[in-house]
Image: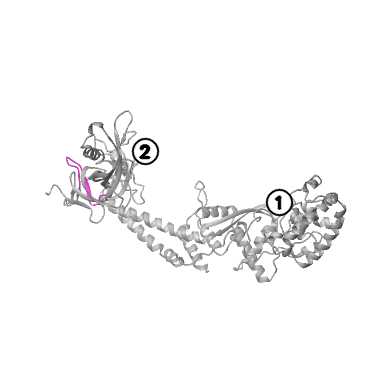
Amino acid sequence: MFFHIVLERNMQLHPRHFGRNLRENLVAKLMKDVEGTCSGQHGFVVAITGIENIGKGLIRDGTGFVSFPVKYQCVVFRPFKGEILEAVVTMVNKMGFFAEAGPVQIFVSNHLIPDDMEFQSGDMPNYTTSDGSVKIQKDSEVRLKIIGTRVDATEIFCIGTIKDDFLGVINDPASV
Amino acid sequence: MSIEPFNRLVKLAARAFYDDITTKGDNQPKTGRSDNRGIAVVVLDALSRRQWVREEDLAKDLKLHSKQLRRTLRFFEEEKLVTRDHRKETAKGAKIFSAAVAATADGQQPTKEGEEKIKLHTHSYCCLDYAQIYDVVRYRLHRMKKKLKDELEDKNTVQEYVCPNCGKRYNALDALQLISLEDEYFHCESCNGELVAESDKLASQEVGDGDSNARRLRREKLKDMLQNMEVQLKPLMEQINRVKDLPAPEFGTLQAWEARANAQRRAENGESSATDPSKSSHGLGYGGTPMPFLGDTKVEVDFSGVEGKGNDIKSEADTTSLKVLPPWMIKQGMNLTKEQRGEVKQEAKMDDTLAAPEYSDDKKANTEDNEKTLQDEYFKAYYAALIQRQQEEAEKSRQVGMKSKRDENEGDDNVNWEEAPVAGDANGNFKVNDLNVEADATAEDEDDIDWEEG
């Protein structure tokens, strides 16, 4: 699920950026530092949408760096148990398959794949129904449900299922 | 409050879940004779016809060995169906229980009476805990259904993997760390062994790895199990729903139940408030039990000189007559002799000459505070004595309130002298309504002597 929230961060800015572009430099550095990171509490920071407030800079003794407390608005993505996501399959093996929904990785184990789909090994390992009409392989797009999340301080990992109504392949790359 | 639906619930649950429970250890051979399956049901049924019951009695009634019964009951205690209570008691305590049993409405007559020895024995009592049974059964049903359903739908189940070499366990959430670059299997982090998916599921024992036929069979089996469960446990579920809104029968703790049962019997027999079980000193476990069923607290002050007045308190006089009670055990309203209080008359007489004047002065000061609460006869007697005492005192030139001097003569400085005048004289046996004005037992006793001397 996506959230629009306000976060705060202390930014250290090198003295060479001081000048009339200080603010631009600060924001650019903030985006570079923060976007794409993951915190267990808030999830993945997808994008910074605006700066709320930049506090007074404090010169660090000895280095000349200045630290600014910056409040910024951003979009975060945080997966939850029970959430339905669309993801791209990245790897298929005997134990199940891995998929990615943006920054988050999801594992679907083989007992959470519908019973009528069977693993086919080979050059392009895949799960296929007996009549061959549905196939899950690398780069397939699937809709899945998250049934468990592991949230570490800097990492989020999910397990999902496609064994439910309206879940499964939504776009087969082979047929396109 | 009807107990019947709950008893039905107990019986149904007993037959559903505890039918084939055997309390024998697994190491013993299961011959036909030692096979005691079904005993759990019998015990539960018997308990549903009783309230609190002594385990020995129950064993006798059921013609079971008490050890066997105890084992069964311990099992039920762990299952949270039964509450148990153990206490040390003499024959007298057992009698109180027997009286309580006799008072209960279901007319269970105690089979024995008074064959116990005076020695302290640990007796165990047990009783069904209906409120908890309701919860336990409901939870059990819920868990059973959930387990089957989850397995049927593979819902919310996190696949577990186990390393056959080192036995280390992983689950699907670890999958990212477990994939190896060489092949498509998961590998153990510590020994690099190939992990196998674990199947500890009910119906999957024969399923090697997920070939579709086996899976289908498994599903069928699970479905059957779920259906069977629904059908077979239907009466139990209906009973659960029936008792849902009824208040569960509550017997309280053993002591509370006993006290209530005895109070009820007294009320029926029209007896006065004699034989308070809380006061009878038969052993442990009764001491500070609150007795909310005894009605208003009435404190009667009996003076030790007037033995005849105490005859409505029969219970403890015989057992404890010669025993010396420590001061902290002497409570208000206890009818005790001087010997029981551990006092010797000579001692009291010795210090009398010294202490007497001071008493009366203290009394004088105290009287002003308390006099409104006292009765008229009391005043008459008291002032008569006071005047007499003051006359004596006038001859001596003693200072008021020097209590420290008499401590050398008598050991117990705990004695609450200040309160002495309240109940101290008149040799009457009257009720003091205000408990704050109540005299300390020891003080009143001392004082009694004092007045006799004076």
Give amino acid for label 2.
Lys
Q: In the rendered view, tell whether residue A92 sits above or below residue B130.
A: above
Q: Secondary structure at mark 2?
A: loop
Q: Residues within 10 Å of mark 2 (few under 14, many from 20)?
A: some
Question: Could you tell me residue B443's position as x and y percent?
Answer: 76, 54
Q: Is residue A119 magenta?
A: yes
In screen coordinates, is B168 left or right of B332?
A: left
The residue under label 2 is B168
Span of residues in magenta: A111-128
Q: How is the image coloured?
A: one colour
Q: Separation of disc 2 and disc 1 at Cα?
A: 62 Å
Q: Secondary structure at mark 1?
A: helix
Give amino acid for label 1.
Trp
In screen coordinates, is B213 left or right of B440?
A: left
Q: Outermost residue toward the top?
A: A62
In screen coordinates, is B301 left or right of A173?
A: right
Point out which mark residue B328 bears. 1
Camera-side residue: B189 or B61?
B189
Q: Residue at x 78, y 48 (%)?
A: B402
Q: Residue at x 77, y 57 (%)?
A: B363
Q: Please, which chain is the residue tagged with disc 1 on?
A: B
Q: In the rendered view, tell whether residue B159 sits above or below residue B21.
A: above
Q: Is residue B159 visible?
A: no
Point out which mark residue A124 bears. none
Q: Residue at x 36, y 57 (%)?
A: B225
Question: Could you tell me residue B354's position as x and y percent?
Answer: 84, 49
Question: Could you tell me residue A8's position as x and y percent?
Answer: 31, 43
Q: In the figure, residue B312 lies in which quadrant?
A: bottom right
Q: Residues within 10 Å of mark 1 (few under 14, many from 20)?
A: few
